[in-house]
Image (cartoon, rainbow, N blue to C red):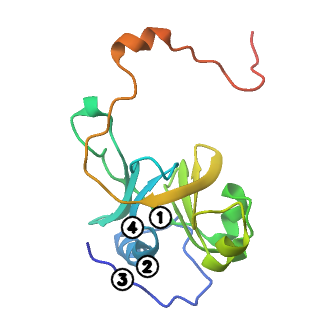
Amino acid sequence: MVSACSNNNDDSQSTGDNTNASDAQVAANQYDEVFAGCYTVSKDEPAQIKISTQDQGLVMQMKEPKSAGRVWDDPEPLEPIDLDQTEKYFSIDKNNLTAMIGRPDRVLVLGHIKSAYVNINPTLDSPYLGFILQGANTIYKVACDDNVNMDLVSEEDMSNITVKPIGKVDTE
């Protein structure tokens, strides 16, 4: 994997709305050092999200269940997000972040927190925040592995699963 770092003192960051292939590669090089690696929502679990640089730029992949027959799903593109959009995803002041990236559909957004802020905020034990499906939490950068994921439930156990909505649900 090739990494590049930049001394980016320019506060103007791309929103990703008009990114072409060349811009995507520049963005991938600038954000690769901060975000490339694997992540999980609990530091005691194996990696579930992988971020890397591929031909099309910075991409993410999710670990597949054992039954899928492969370790990682198809790469999804990632793009830089302007720090002015921080409040849409995280309850942290934009001045405490160094960078944000996300999928174009914003189902996943990652933020990198300045180490000085992590050191003084007792609620943070990781320099990364993840916004996944409308919820934000600390996430952990962990070692990447290409081990096949274990299936969480067997087909025999599926009959016992009950899905209940959270919050008020309108019914007709």
Query: Residue 117: x, y in percent?
Result: 69, 75
**In 3D space, how far apart are the residues under numbered discs 4 and 3 (Cα atoms)?**
11 Å
Q: Which mark is residue 30?
A: 2
Badge 1 amino acid: Glu
Is label 3 in contact with label 2 (beta carbons under 8 Å)?
Answer: yes
**In 3D space, how far apart are the residues under numbered discs 3 and 2 (Cα atoms)?**
7 Å
The N terminus is located in which quarter? bottom left
Taking depth in this image into account, of 97 and 107 the one nearest to the observer is 97
Which residue in the rendered view is the most extreme toward the front? 44
Is label 1 in contact with label 4 (beta carbons under 8 Å)?
Answer: no
Q: Residues within 10 Å of mark 3 (few under 14, many from 20)?
A: few
Query: Residue 134: x, y in percent?
Result: 64, 44
**In 3D space, how far apart are the residues under numbered discs 1 and 2 (Cα atoms)?**
11 Å
Q: Earlier in the sequence, mark 3 or mark 2?
A: 3
Q: Earlier in the sequence, mark 4 or mark 2?
A: 2
Is label 4 in contact with label 3 (beta carbons under 8 Å)?
Answer: no
Total labels: the figure holds 4
Query: Residue 16: x, y in percent?
Result: 51, 66
Taking depth in this image into account, of 36 and 59 the one nearest to the observer is 36
Q: Residues within 10 Å of mark 4 (few under 14, many from 20)?
A: some
Q: Nearer the viewer, mark 1 or mark 4?
A: 4
- Which quadrant holds residue 121? bottom right
Q: Which residue is mark 1?
A: 79
